[in-house]
Amino acid sequence: MNEYLVKKLREGRLNMNLKQSDVTKLTGIKNTTLSNYENGITEPDIDTFLQLCELYGLDYAEILGE
């Protein structure tokens, strides 16, 4: 698991003052799935990753470049 990706996804959500339950409501991603992403258990597919980056205002190219 990419530790940088895990860190940036969690930071992005927190910087937007969103709870995991808020992200679930906005995206339809299950709370447990989101938690698995943020804890490094699983990685999002590219479409989900891009959706989260857009929601969190993250630069996906920067994250993938690391």
Image (tube, grey):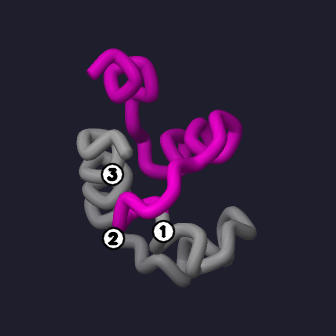
Question: What residue is drawn where x is 74% and y is 69%?
Answer: 28
How far apart, in angstroms, are the residues tagged by discs 1 and 2? 19 Å
* Cβ atoms at labels 1 and 3 below 8 Å apart: no
- Residue 57, located in which quarter of the rendered image? top left
* Residue farthest along the right direction in this orientation: 28
Q: Earlier in the sequence, mark 1 or mark 3?
A: 3
Question: What residue is drawn where x is 33% and y is 70%?
Answer: 17
Label 2 environment density (alpha carbons within 10 Å; few <14, some 14–19, many ≥20): few
Question: What residue is drawn where x is 33% and y is 51%?
Answer: 6
Q: Find the magenta span and give its range.
A: 37-66
How far apart, in angstroms, are the residues tagged by discs 1 and 3? 10 Å
Label 3 environment density (alpha carbons within 10 Å; few <14, some 14–19, many ≥20): some
Q: Mark number for residue 60? A: none
Residue 56 point in image, percent of width and height: 44, 50
Query: Which secondary structure lies at badge 3?
Result: helix
In the figure, is residue 1 to the left or right of 26? left
Q: Nearer the viewer, mark 2 or mark 3?
A: 3
Quadrant containing the N terminus in the rendered view? top left
Q: Mark number for residue 17? A: 2
Label 1 environment density (alpha carbons within 10 Å; few <14, some 14–19, many ≥20): some
How far apart, in angstroms, are the residues tagged by discs 2 and 3? 17 Å
In the figure, is residue 63 to the left or right of 20? left
Please state which amino acid type lies under the numbered disc 2: Asn
Of 47 and 3, which appears nearest the observer?
3
Residue 12 point in image, percent of width and height: 33, 53
Query: Which secondary structure lies at badge 2?
Result: loop
Residue, disc 1: 36
* Cβ atoms at labels 1 and 2 below 8 Å apart: no
Residue, disc 3: 6
Q: Is residue 57 above or below residue 13?
A: above
